[in-house]
Amino acid sequence: MLENDRFFMEKQYHKFYELDIWKEGYNLQKEIFEITLTFPKYAYDIVSQINRSTNSIIANIAESHGRFHFADKIRVLYISRGEIEETQSHIMVAVSRKYMTKQDGNLLIQRYENLKMKLNGYISSFRTKESQ
C-alpha cells in the first residue's frame, strides 16, 4: 500500500456516527433536549417541534450515509440543512416566548449556523466527487 493510500484510508469514515457533523449535531440535539426540559408544561407544542427537528438533522445525516448515489446523498443532506433552519426558527420562537434567554438562543442559533456551514462543505465534497 502506498503512503498516500494509507492516509486516504485513515481519513474515510465507516459509520455515520463517526462523522464530525453527525457528532456535532448529536451533541446539539442532546443540549436542546435538556433545555426543553426547563420549558413550561404548557409549551408542549414547541418542545415537540424543536425536539423533532433537532433529531431529524442527525437522522438525515445518518440516512445520507447509507445512500449509494451522490445525488441521493446530497438530496437527503439538503433536508438536513432545512431542518437546521427549522430548528433555528423554533429557537427564535422559544426566546420570544421567554422559554430561554436571548443570549442562550443566540448562542444556539450560531452553533447551528456553524453546523450548517460544515454541512454545506460536506455537500460540496459530494458535488466534487459527483462531477469527477
Image (spheres, helix red, strand yellow):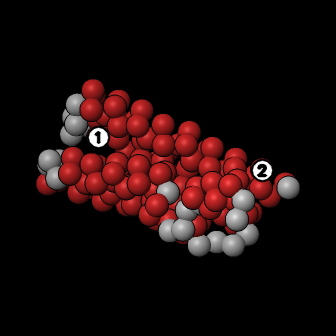
At mark 2, the secondary structure is helix
What residue is pinned by disc 2?
A: 128
Crowdedness of circle 1 by 10 Å Cα count: few (<14), some, many (20+)? many
What residue is rendered at 54% in x and 55% in y? 80
What residue is rendered at 50% in x and 68% in y? 15
At mark 1, the secondary structure is helix
Question: Which quadrant does the C terminus fall into?
Answer: bottom right
Which of the 4 image quadrants contains residue 76? bottom right
Crowdedness of circle 2 by 10 Å Cα count: few (<14), some, many (20+)? few
What residue is pinned by disc 1?
A: 94
What residue is rendered at 70% in x and 65% in y? 1
Cβ–Cβ under 8 Å for marks 2 and 1: no
Pick whichever, 38 or 30, lies toward us: 30
Q: Amino acid at mark 2?
A: Thr
Pick whichever, 55 or 2, lies toward us: 2
- Which is closer to the viewer, label 2 or label 1? 2
Q: Is residue 56 left or right of residue 117?
A: left
